[in-house]
Image (cartoon, helix red, strand yellow):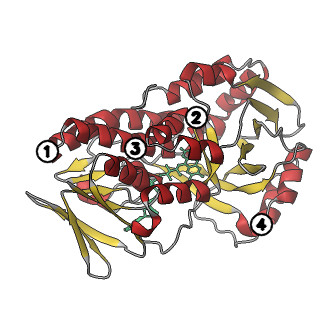
Amino acid sequence: MKAVIIGAGMGGLTAAIALKQIGFDVEVYERVTENKPVGAAISVWSNGVKCLNYLGLEKEAAELGGIMDTMSYVDGFDGSTMCRFSMAPLIEEVGQRPYPMARAELQLMLMNAYGIDDIHFGKKMVSVTDGEDSATATFDDGTTATGDIVIAADGANSLVREYVLGGPVQRSYAGYVNFNGLVPIDEEIGSATEWTTYVGDSRRVSVMPVSGDRFYFFFDVTMPSGETLERGAAREFLAEEFKDWAPGVQKLINSLEPDKVNRVEIFDLDPFDTWVKGRVALLGDAAHNTTPDIGQGGCSAMEDSVALQFAFTNHPDDVHAALAEYQEARAGRAGDLVLRARKRSEVTHGKDPEKTEEWYEELRHEDGANVLRGIIGNIKGGPVTS
Ligand SMILES: Cc1cc2nc3c(=O)[nH]c(=O)nc-3n(C[C@H](O)[C@H](O)[C@H](O)COP(=O)(O)OP(=O)(O)OC[C@H]3O[C@@H](n4cnc5c(N)ncnc54)[C@H](O)[C@@H]3O)c2cc1C
């Protein structure tokens, strides 16, 4: 069997590794010319880590992962701790520690695991077709790649999604812009082994540790879509937007490198159940574009890849049966995560400000049980259970 994979993000790369493991001949095509991911880091929750472990990357994942032993919520304005609790009950229940990881390092680790020299960079896919015996991707330089299957891991603005669904779909704006980057760990911002989140005024500012004594930070700013900000102007912008916030937030704003701050408008897409057309299948954000509010988009892409491997292990000679099993295994689970994230986003970002205030009040009385139950609910349900 031969698979043509479009996109060398975490979806395409984990799919490539997963299919190679079961003997597929795999070709990966990526439009960019080098490893330059948008975004500073991601939290790979336990379900994602389990997928990486399953793909033989346990040691590599642990090396890149930051250690989060506790979580806390802090009043964004006065800096008082609303709640702080251990993550040990979560780790014990799901059997795996989550790992926040720098995005570029995760991508590079996956590229090396697949074989970085075997990735065809600078190849922009412009169309796909499929027939009785094969599927073909065509690139903007006029070349083509043909396999038994095409796996489209071409991200949130997937072109192949239009092919599979028969037309374009509209993503919806979640009402906020996310600014993110990396800074050296500083205990005045947050504890070195804690996921610290400042909340207030339907906004949040968060830091979590990644390897190399760095914090991954992000600011969620509720604002209209379509506004622009010059690269390098993030510090002035955030200083103005968060001028009344606590000293830890000011410290963070002062320590960030403005040129390296990413600015991302957050969108998601209503879940849909058709991920496969003939020999072409969607995977990752192409199939389930979510807000990052529960940190599950990338984890879900990793789950897709493992499920794809399971499906072809069960149906080694039958592409259609395998892809049907893949779709059946994944569409419901991934769609559920998109809706969970949307719900979380609405509360965090003040869709109904009263509900957001109620949430802040809950946080002041939280002993960890509710928050951890929610996260455990997101983690459970993936293909790798042990
Ligand atoms: C601010 C933010 C924070 C996030 N935080 C988390 C988190 O904490 N945890 C988590 O699990 N997830 C998180 N996510 C989600 C996560 O980033 C995505 O779910 C994940 O990157 C999806 O991987 P993917 O491979 O499907 O898509 P992508 O990573 O977008 O990769 C798609 C690849 O396809 C390539 N491509 C696109 N079109 C073509 C084409 N025509 N031809 C060739 N190549 C093409 C692109 O260049 C890209 O390399 C976050 C997302 C955002 C925006």
Tell me the SS state at disc 4: helix
Q: Are marks 4 and 3 in contact (CB under 8 Å)?
A: no
Q: Is residue 35 left or right of residue 144?
A: right
Q: Residue at x 42, y 50 (%)?
A: 14
Tell me the SS state at disc 2: helix
Image: 294 above or below 369: below
The answer to which of marks 4 and 3 sits earlier in the sequence is 4
How far apart, in angstroms, are the residues tagged by discs 4 and 2?
Answer: 28 Å
Residue highlighted by disc 4: 258
Q: Residue at x 52, y 40 (%)?
A: 296
Q: Nearer the viewer, mark 4 or mark 2?
A: 4
- Work out whether residue 350 can be spotted: no
Disc 2 residue type (three-letter): Arg
Residue highlighted by disc 1: 317
- Work out whether residue 146 can be spotted: yes
Image: 145 above or below 346: below
In the drawing, what numbered circle is on residue 270?
A: 3
Q: Are marks 1 and 2 in contact (CB under 8 Å)?
A: no
How far apart, in angstroms, are the residues tagged by discs 1 and 2?
Answer: 42 Å
Q: Nearer the viewer, mark 4 or mark 1?
A: 1
Binning the other alpha carbons within 10 Å of mark 1 as few (below 14), some (14 to 19) or many (20 upward) gives few
Q: Residue at x 74, y 70 (%)?
A: 259
Q: Return the x and y of residue 111 as percentages of the image width and height.
A: 48, 59
Q: Is residue 134 left or right of residue 288?
A: left
Determine whether the beta carbon of the residue marked 2 sits less than 8 angstroms from the nearest atom of ligand 1.
Answer: no
Which of the two residues, 294 or 149, is positioned nearer the viewer here? 149
